[in-house]
Amino acid sequence: MKVSLFATCLTNAFYPEVDLTMAKILKYLGHTVDVPEGQACCGQIAFNSGYISDAREVARTLIDSFEHSEIVVGPSGSCIGMIHHYYPFLFENDPVYLAKAHDLIGKSYEFTQFLVDILKQPDLGAKYSAKATYHPSCHATRFLEIVEPPLKLLEHVKGLELLPLPEAQLCCGFGGTFSVKIPKISEAMVAEKAEHVLASGADLLLGLDMGCLMNISGYLEKINKPVKTMHIIQLLGEGMQG
Amino acid sequence: MTMYKEIVEKRVDKALADDFLRKATRRATDRLRLGKFKAAQDLGDWEDWRLAGEAIRTQVVANLDFYLKQLIEQVEKNGGHVHLAKTPVEAVDIVRKLVHEHDAKNVIKSKSMVSEEIHLNSALESEGVSVIETDLGEYIIQVAGEPPSHIIVPAMHKTRQQVADLFEPIAGHTLSSDTPTLTKFVRQEMREKFLHGDIGITGCNFAVANTGSIVMVTNEGNGRMVSTLPRVQITLMGMERIVPSFRELDVLLNLLGRSATGQRLSSYTTILTPPKHSSDSDGPEEFHLVILDHNRSEILGDTTFRRALNCIRCGACFNVCPVYRQIGGHAYGSVYAGPIGSVITPLLEKDWDKWGHLPYFSTLCGACTEGCPVRIPLHDLLVKLRARKTLSGHTPQIEKRIFQGYRYMFTHEKRLRQALRMGAHLQRPFVKHERIVGGPPPLSNWTKSRTLPMVASKSFMQMWSELKLSEKSSNSDPIQ
């Protein structure tokens, strides 16, 4: 398959290794990978802050950059969720881009969903010894209904013991600009999430969205209780080498 | 606006510093949430019930003019009086006039969020009328002089000890803080009040349009006392609180009890068709239905937000909201707190300066939408309210600039790439142990409680371009 990568703004700037590993895994599975130029961001940060017209222009840029792609895969339930959940609303008065948005929605997937639901490859032969817990990110779970795929992938990682995360359904408090606009409530939320991560007994925190992971691990580091944190892509990447 | 910003911050700080409040809120919402989950599972086909509930509410709201007319005709045919109040002030005036006409000294009330919305108690009390809330939770917060912190569990934030302390001056002796003692005390207090009530004021969970009946869902039976003992009954309702007939009521009662408290049915479901008829053994001789608009007509005409009127006031969205969980209800500042309160308050009150903070009291995690028994897309409405606030020019200039900058950068990837290269250099003064620390606001709002990773020395897009170049020159695939 010819797969175009959507390097989300957060991974592009802060965690390029997540995007790169995603490329490597897809290549390893025999797919042709490209990274269309011009892509930058799904626009969610402006959209969620109420700046619709700014978000729309950024979204337009993203749509344009993937216009000729057959399949688009990104390492984030939140960004793919933005496209699926809000692009139709964003372009409701622009029939040309509305059609293009629907085209993008029809061909775009979050990484774990793509691997498990589309490629039907939950087993990448990865090995990784750790006691891990998994934070189900809100947008992946609630906007895209991605529940099983990440768990299926983790089930097949040899040596990985997956411990339940108490109150896993609770948002970590990131919420994009929420974290800096109402920092105190955000802090209270991430403090509770951190409490549950520590209570899980895991020494590795996994997720499929770097925004949430950056928030949770950043807090754990700040309170001097660092827990190793990885995107599922990073875990698979390392596990496939081992 | 700055003034309100400070008030909001103060309220949030106060809530966050109140360990008891936060623990109590966690405990109570957990209990309600798990109860709801179990009750929904017991019923089976919960998603189908939600769809049915949504369909009923959407149909009622879309045809509200028809059902309102039918309801009014039925109530009048039954011998009741209907009053339409355009504003909270009008609603208060209607009640005040009725109180004066009947020379009422003692008003007893069962739970009504509309009465909170119009701030009825303080208005009546200022004229020397004694107003008593007869729902236990409402009574507690009335004595404490506080607004409800949850629409279903108004005194959720109070300990038994705090309640005992509040009641002691009324009792005139010390009270032990065990539940039987406290409830016994309130029961005794209430018996007296019930017997001396001149007018009973009730809320209304649903009004049945084709019979003119009022439906109240309670757990203490106080609603029955308020609507049978006094000679005059006044019922307050929001204009959207209608069901066409008992058929639809069946579905909504199933959703309401389960979603609110995890009960298949609340202890008391009171259906009244007042006033008292010659064949009735009890009930009020005179019945007044006050129907409040308070900008609901405007919401009705707004296709984006109309769905907010579908709410059946079950409070399920409170119990799953991770923001409400941390701060409780008072920090919102509004009569209706939680996700639904954050949606409807700005729409009802139409004051961005005062209520503009509410749509931001959410991470947009979607738990509210998932929890809503009539499928109101609450988080979508919250984000759309933010957009409306921005469009109306009520957001800070600096924020506008930031997003203009964002748009400039993120519509041209090459510009972004350059900016990230610069960022990797510019971050140096703030880097410590490979993490960004400190920095100016809004960055510091993050770094105060969390570490931030460094901007990568090479963005992925940059990395990929370079890999592509080397692939071309070496004729091999460097990323394998």
Image: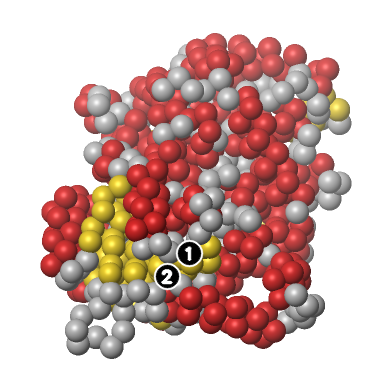
Which quadrant is home to the N terminus of chain B?
top right
Residue A68 point in image, percent of width and height: 32, 26
**Rendered image: mark on residue A203:** none
Dot 1 lies on which element?
A: loop
According to the picture, the residue beneath numbered tag 2 turns out to be: B198
Residue pointed to by mark 1? B105
Q: Amino acid at mark 2?
A: Asp
Could you tell me which residue is drawn at 69 percent across and 84 percent down?
B181
Q: Residues within 10 Å of mark 1 (few under 14, many from 20)?
A: some
Nearer to the camera, B241 or A4: B241
Judge left or right: residue A122 versus residue B328.
Answer: left
The vertical placement of A133 against A40, above or below, is below
Q: Position of residue A94 (x, y in %)?
A: 25, 24
For the residues labelled 2 and 1, the Cα–Cα distance comes to: 7 Å
B6 on left or right of B278 = right
Chain bearing mark 1: B
**Residue drawn at point x = 36 percent, y = 79 percent:** B228
Position of residue A29 relative to residue B421, above or below, is: below
Mark 2 vs mark 1: same chain?
A: yes
> Label 2 crowding class (10 Å Cα cut-off): few <14, some 14-19, many 20+?
many
- Give the quadrant of residue B172: bottom right
Q: Are marks 2 and 1 in contact (CB under 8 Å)?
A: yes
Q: Write down the quadrant of residue B208 in the picture.
A: bottom left
Judge left or right: residue A133 versus residue A24. right
SS at circle 2: loop
Quarter assignment of residue B436: top right
The location of residue B340, given as percent across then percent down, is: 45, 50
From the top left corner, tell me how far across and down residue B161 is, in percent: 76, 71
Residue found 48% across the figure and 64% down from its top: B105
In this rendered view, identify the residue nearer to me: B188 or B480: B188
